[in-house]
Amino acid sequence: MYISGMNRRNFLHQMGLAVPAVGLAAMTPEAFSLKTCPEISELQTAEGDDFWNGIKSSFTVSPNIINLNNGGVSPQPLQVQNAHIRFYQYSNEAPSYYMWRILDQGRESLRAQLAKIAGCDTEEIAINRNATEGLNSVIFGLNLAKGDEVILGKYDYPNMMNAWKQREKREGIILKWVELDLPSENPQAIIDAYIAQFSDRTKVIHLTHMINWNGQILPVKEIARKAKARGIEVIVDAAHSFGHIDFKIPDLECDYLATSLHKWLCAPFGSGLLYVRKEKISKVWALLSSPEPDGSDIRKFESLGTRSFASEMAIGTAIDFHEMIGAKRKADRLTDLRLYWMREAAGIKGLKLYTSMNPDYSCAIGVVGAEGRELSDLDQFLFNKKGIHAVAINIEKITGMRITPHVYTSFSDLDRLLEGLSDFVRS
């Protein structure tokens, strides 16, 4: 349905607040919608190839490059792209009018959508650009004094480690580092490693729910319970777990959490979410200017100035797509894809796996290395010979290629990966 310039204006006037909530993607024939496609909807309870082939057809991924670095950033299904483009075009017709008076009015309905899939109160969700921004808001916003201790891990994300190092350098807080032996199928050992760092001066513990380097899932809830019993604040980096594994934020019993929605939720690039437990909001200073930087309104974390309204509003379409698949079915499919290639790779002489095969400790992310071979050579071989794009990981004791399929990845794509790995170790 094409809407002319004048009709579009009338349309937007009439739709008002409902425009962003509807998402518009489902209203156009080019935006393939599994919710309204009878051929696919009949298969929604099936786990066969027909259903997942239908999912793949929703994406516009290259047929010539097999993208196995979805952990870095995920592509968006076509309906999300189309929603983004339409909102962007509306904005350009009269920017200050359409952005501030029309699209911005959809923020509260979007906040409610995000709160629903996150399982928390609407007043605990701030919409921002990525996990780094959300976590930095908390890291730099908490009141800490010289000598206060913060516990974090050596496998945390660099942006977060650097933020804490900045506070250490400027204010004299003390960072205590947890070393982990990964991969691990011993949650108690991980819990004990963090608890061992607790002291009377510990104020904050920073946890990565799913470690981006190798996909290890940490027992966050158990660690959080121990920390909170000691009055320690709990921050969670959920950049790789939200929209990936099946959980709700309150399940983790944390005080603060942030994620990037452009990863596993397949929302537009540069979209994110910050969660702050309601009673904690006033304890965190707003990172950017706000009329009440120490107030109790979660919106104080959204004072970004002019932002991409188009990207933000299209998040709702990504949520629809995620819910259509279902969180559990999605997580199960991602686990199946990882186990498919890892089980075969485990039998190839010369390869080493850096991710547990147990579904309790990882989901889509897996890391494989070639013993005695240069990582850069494996990286180039997979791309040049098989057209496979993945990412090389070399941190602490992990040295290998991180393989991250997504819901549009097929088993035949992974067969090509296995061929490439086998050919490389024989070369």
Image (spheres, rainbow, N blue to C red):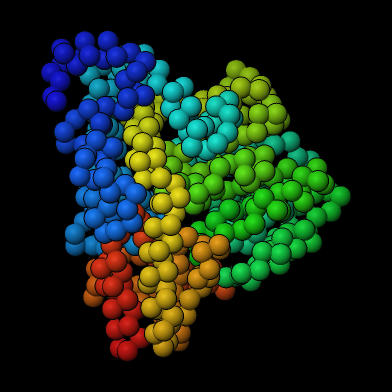
Q: Residue at x 64, y 57 (%)?
A: 219
Q: Residue 149: x percent and y percent? A: 77, 50
Q: Is residue 164 above or below residue 125?
A: below
Q: Residue at x 84, y 53 (%)?
A: 199
Taking 334 as reference, is 168 left or right? right
Q: Residue furthest right?
A: 200
Quarter containing the C terminus:
bottom left
Residue nearer the viewer, 41 or 349:
41
Residue nearer the viewer, 314 or 305:
314
Q: Residue at x 33, y 13 (%)?
A: 16
Taking 230 as reference, is 11 left or right? left
Taking 145 as reference, is 403 left or right? left
Q: Residue at x 35, y 41 (%)?
A: 324
Q: Residue 271: x percent and y percent? A: 42, 38
Q: Residue 307: x percent and y percent? A: 40, 28
Q: Is residue 357 visible?
A: yes
Quarter containing the N terminus:
top left
Q: Is residue 383 visible?
A: no
Taking 77 as reference, is 289 left or right? right
Q: Residue 288: x percent and y percent? A: 56, 29
Q: Quadrant of residue 287?
A: top right
What is the total number of numbered labels drawn onto the structure image? 0
Q: Is residue 45 above or below residue 418?
A: above
Q: Is residue 407 above or below residue 140?
A: below
